[in-house]
Image (cartoon, rainbow, N blue to C red):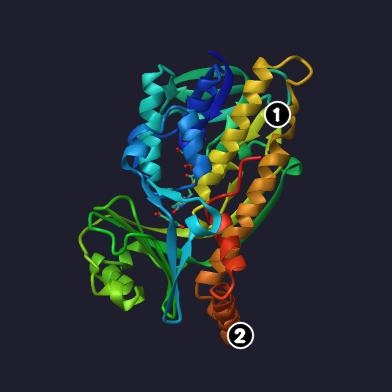
C-alpha cells in the first residue's frame, strides 16, 4: 500500500489529523492497534478550547459538538472555605465547551467512514522504518498476514506508550519528566451534575473536581494516593469522599448513582524534544503529557495536528521554495505552545492539590497564591487566558 501521510494511532490526534489532511486533499492512512470499541471505551478529557472547536469545524466534524456541547463561560475555585468564580467570558472574552473526548472520537470515526478513508484497526506488531531516509515505511500484521505501507511521511499519534517515539534513537531525543506524588480517582455516572459549571477544590482532604459530560451525566474526580487501587473504592466509598470534599451547599444537593466507569489515573508532566525526526513527526500524547488539572491534554494534541496538517498542505500544494517552511518549523512552533501548556498545567496542579511533603509553609504558599488571585484582576486574567487556551501559532 502507498499513501502520502501514514498515521500511527486512531485516538483523537490521529483521527483529527486524518480528517484535516483529507480536507486539504492530502492522502492518508491510519493504523491502530486496538478495536474501535476499545478506543471509544477510554474515558478521558471533557473540556474543549475554542482552538480545538475551530479545528473540528475546519475538518467538518463539529455538527454534533455544536448541537450537544455545553458552552461554559467560567468555573469555580474553592479553597479554605472560600469560593470564587473565574469569569472567562468577562476576563478574556472567550469560553470553553464541555464535550467528552469519547464523543469527539466517535464523531471523527463516523466522519472518516463517511468520507471513505480507511483505518486499519487491531493491527499487531506495528513498526516504523526508514524515517531518516526518503522512503519511510509502516509495517504491521493483521489476521496473521504481514502488511506494509510506503509513505512520504509518518506521524506518530500513538500516545505515551506508542511505538513511534520508542523507535527514535535515544541519542536523538531529549526528554523532561515530573511524576506527581498522587493520582486522580475518577467516576463517570448518569447523575445530574452537582453544579452548572465546573468546581475545582483544594480541600484539607485533597483535590476534587466536579465536571460533567451533559445535563444528565457527571464526571467527578478526587485526589488519591499513588498506591491506591480502584478496587479499594466502592461506589459508596467514592460518594462519601466526594461529598466530604464538596462545598456544603453542593454536597447538600449531590445526586449519587452507580458508576459507569471508575479508574485511577497517575499524573505526570512529560515532554520529548524535538517532535520531528527526518520524515517521522510526533503529535499529541506521543510527544507530551500534562496532568489533567488544566484540561490541556486533548487540546494540545489538537493544536499539534492543526499545525501539522497545515504544514503538509503547504508541502503538497506549495511551490518548491515554500514547500518546507511548515514542516521544518513544526517542532519548534508546537513545542513553544506545548511548554506554555506544561507550565500552566504544572502550576494549576501545584496550586490545587495537597502536598503533605511541602509542610505547613507549602500549604500557606498555596493559600496566599489563591487569596492574591482573588484580589487581582490581572492574576485572574492570566488564569483565564491559559484555561481557554493560547492561540495556534
Ligand atoms: P491517545 O493515547 O488518546 O491515542 C493514542 C492511540 O494510539 C490509541 O488509540 C492507542 O491504542 C494507539 N496506539 C498506541 N500504540 C500503538 C501502536 N504501537 N500501533 C498502533 N496504534 C497504537 N486530557 C484532558 O484534557 N482532560 C482529562 O481529564 C484527561 N484525562 C485523562 C485520563 C487518562 C487515564 C489518560 C491516559 C489521559 C487523560 N487525558 C486527559 C489526556 C488525554 O485526553 C490525551 O491528551 C489524549 O487522549 C491525547 O490524544 P492522542 O494523542 O490521540 O493519544
Ligand atoms: C473532565 O471533565 O474529565 C475534566 C474537566 C476538566 C479538567 C480535567 C478533566 O481539568
Residue name at image x 29 percent, y 50 percent: 214
Instruction: Check the image and report above or below for 206 versus 60.
Output: below
Residue name at image x 31 percent, y 42 percent: 68
Given residues 148 and 26, the one toward you in this image is 26
Determine if the C-beta at disc 1 is less than 8 A from ligand 1.
no
Residue name at image x 62 percent, y 34 percent: 307
Residue 5 falls in which quadrant of the image? top right
The C terminus lies in which quarter of the figure?
top right
Query: Residue 259: x, y in percent?
Result: 25, 57
Given residues 232 and 50, the one toward you in this image is 50
**Mark 2 to mark 1: distance in Å?**
47 Å
Given residues 328 and 74, the one toward you in this image is 74
Residue 78 falls in which quadrant of the image? bottom left
Query: Residue 152: x, y in percent?
Result: 64, 19
Residue under circle 1? 327
Query: Quick one: SS at disc 2?
Result: helix
Camera sees residue 179: no
Residue under circle 2? 361
> Which residue is most to the right?
321
Camera sees residue 53: yes
Query: Quick one: SS at disc 1?
Result: helix
Instruction: Check the image and report above or below for 338 versus 19.
Output: below
Disc 2 or 1, which lies upstream in sequence?
1
Residue name at image x 75 percent, y 40 percent: 172
> Which residue is most to the bottom?
360
Instruction: Check the image and report above or below for 156 versus 204.
Output: above
Marks 2,1: beta carbons within 8 A: no
Q: Residues within 10 Å of mark 2 (few under 14, many from 20)?
A: few
Query: Residue 10: x, y in percent?
Result: 46, 33
- Ligand 2 is found in the corner quadrant, namely bottom left
Amino acid at each position: 500500500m502507498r499513501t502520502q501521510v501514514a498515521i500511527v494511532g486512531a485516538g483523537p490526534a490521529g483521527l483529527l489529523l486524518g480528517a484535516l489532511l483529507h480536507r486539504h486533499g492530502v492522502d492518508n492512512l491510519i493504523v491502530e492497534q486496538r478495536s474501535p470499541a476499545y478506543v471509544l471505551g477510554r474515558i478521558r478529557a471533557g473540556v474543549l478550547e475554542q482552538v480545538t472547536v475551530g479545528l473540528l469545524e475546519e475538518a467538518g466534524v463539529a455538527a454534533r459538538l455544536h448541537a450537544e456541547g455545553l458552552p461554559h463561560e467560567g468555573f469555580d475555585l474553592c479553597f479554605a472555605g472560600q469560593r470564587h468564580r473565574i469569569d472567562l467570558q468577562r476576563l478574556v472574552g472567550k469560553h470553553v465547551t464541555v464535550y467528552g473526548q469519547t464523543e469527539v472520537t466517535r464523531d471523527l470515526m463516523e466522519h472518516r467512514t463517511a468520507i471513505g478513508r480507511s483505518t486499519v484497526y487491531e493491527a499487531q506488531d506495528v513498526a516504523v522504518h526508514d524515517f531518516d531516509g526518503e522512503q519511510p515505511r509502516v509495517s504491521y500484521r493483521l489476521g496473521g498476514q504481514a502488511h506494509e505501507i510506503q509513505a512520504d511521511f509518518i506521524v506518530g499519534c500513538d500516545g505515551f506508550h506508542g511505538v513511534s517515539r520508542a523507535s527514535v534513537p535515544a541519542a536523538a531525543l531529549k526528554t523532561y519528566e515530573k511524576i506527581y506524588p498522587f493520582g486522580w480517582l475518577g467516576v463517570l455516572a448518569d447523575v445530574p451534575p452537582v453544579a452548572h459549571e465546573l468546581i475545582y477544590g483544594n480541600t484539607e482532604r485533597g483535590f476534587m473536581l466536579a465536571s460533567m459530560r451533559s445535563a444528565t451525566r457527571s464526571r467527578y474526580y478526587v485526589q488519591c494516593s499513588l498506591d491506591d487501587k480502584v478496587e479499594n473504592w466502592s461506589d459508596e466509598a467514592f460518594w462519601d469522599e466526594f461529598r466530604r470534599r464538596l462545598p456544603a451547599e453542593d454536597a447538600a444537593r449531590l445526586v449519587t448513582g452507580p458508576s459507569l466507569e471508575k479508574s485511577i489515573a497517575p499524573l505526570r508532566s512529560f515532554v520529548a524534544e524535538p517532535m520531528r525526526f527526518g520524515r517521522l513527526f510526533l503529535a499529541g500524547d506521543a510527544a507530551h503529557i500534562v496532568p489533567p488539572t488544566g484540561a490541556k491534554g486533548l487540546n494540545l494534541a489538537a493544536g499539534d495536528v492543526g499545525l501539522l496538517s497545515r504544514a503538509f498542505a503547504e508541502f503538497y500544494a506549495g511551490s518548491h521554495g515554500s514547500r518546507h517552511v511548515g514542516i521544518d518549523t513544526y517542532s519548534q512552533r508546537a513545542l513553544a505552545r506545548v511548554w506554555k501548556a506544561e507550565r500552566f498545567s504544572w502550576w494549576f496542579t501545584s496550586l490545587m492539590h495537597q502536598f503533605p511533603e511541602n509542610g505547613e509553609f507549602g500549604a500557606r504558599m498555596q493559600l496566599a497564591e489563591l487569596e492574591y488571585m482573588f484580589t487581582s484582576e490581572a492574576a485572574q486574567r492570566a488564569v483565564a487566558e491559559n484555561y481557554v487556551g493560547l492561540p495556534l501559532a
